[in-house]
Image (cartoon, rainbow, N blue to C red):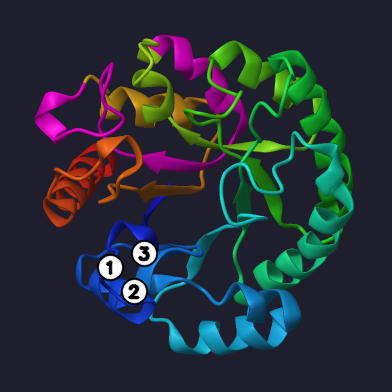
Amino acid sequence: MKLSVTSWSFPELTLDEVGGLAKVLGIEGLDVGYFYRSALDRARLLATPETYADELRRRLPLPVSNLYHLFGNSVADRNLADPANRARNTADFTAVLKFCVGIGSPTVFILPGVINGAQSRAQALAETVESLRPLLDLAAKTGVTVCVEPHVHSYLESPDITAELCERAPGVKLALDYAHFAVSGYRQDEIDGLARWAGHVHLRQARPGALQTKFEQGTLNFPALFATLRDAGYDGWLAAEIVHQGYFDTLHDDVLTETVKLRDLFRAWSAP
């Protein structure tokens, strides 16, 4: 396993600056997305994915470890649980996969969707499974792994329904962030069963009621988390995703300090 950092962790830095900072910290990879000053140009990515990927690959000081792709302009816009979005999303995903291949990103993560209108959780899940089928078929031809991130405010908020999605959509993996379950009160051992489907992992400290908190104030046991992933056969990227944003009031932590604490803990755990 190797450490990366999410480009959206530092909202006032450009993508090149986040990459430079990560390199100075000895972090080996960079997760990229469409947010803040480090945002990729989504229009360019969709229009000329291979050219744009080549430009960035030559420019960035670190390899791209993951692409966070959002189909629309919000969590709800063009979400996977709404069948009206399938054709446009599938068309866009062809370009997204070309970008990932061109830049060398092993994974792309997308969101599962939300409750649309009068949907039940079961209906939202069923629609997401159908929406994922063409995306997984396209990805299978490229070697890029498609990951879905269970998150608070989606319909995919418990370990059980998340496992059901993975079982019903063969080939899908998880962008697994324990914090999105811990905030709702799930114990770490209740989340551990999802490690078998991990395709990418986000790291930040959390506790019930707090999606993100300072390292010493959370309930997640990171050495145990690392061991669970290892024992499940995971050998991919671990992305430090400490953020400074309004979502769930994650505005009160020193992103750099908390990132370094995670780095040091992982180094200590993985040392011979």
Residue 92, image quadrant: bottom right
Find numbered disc 3 in the image and state the secondary structure of the residue it sits on.
loop
The reply to whether callout 2 and callout 1 are in contact (CB within 8 Å) is yes
Residue at image coords 65%, 55%: 72
User: Residue beneath label 1, please?
Assistant: 22
Residue 14, image quadrant: bottom left
The image's mark for residue 19 is 2
Q: Give the range drawn in magenta.
A: 189-218
Find numbered disc 1 in the image and state the secondary structure of the residue it sits on.
helix
Q: Position of residue 60 (x, y in %)?
A: 43, 82
Front: mark 1 or 3: 1
| Residue 207 is a magenta residue | yes
The reply to whether callout 1 and callout 3 are in contact (CB within 8 Å) is no
Front: mark 2 or 3: 2
Find numbered disc 2 in the image and state the secondary structure of the residue it sits on.
helix
Q: Is residue 10 above or below residue 21?
A: above
Residue at image coords 16%, 46%: 258
The image's mark for residue 28 is 3
Marks 1 and 3, the one that precedes in the sequence: 1
Mark 2 and mark 3: span between their CA atoms? 9 Å
Q: In this view, does 252 lie to the left or right of 29?
A: left
Q: Which amino acid does label 3 sit on?
A: Glu
Q: Is residue 260 left or right of residue 149?
A: left
Q: Which amino acid does label 1 sit on?
A: Ala
Q: Position of residue 85 (x, y in %)?
A: 81, 48
Q: Position of residue 40 (x, y in %)?
A: 51, 73
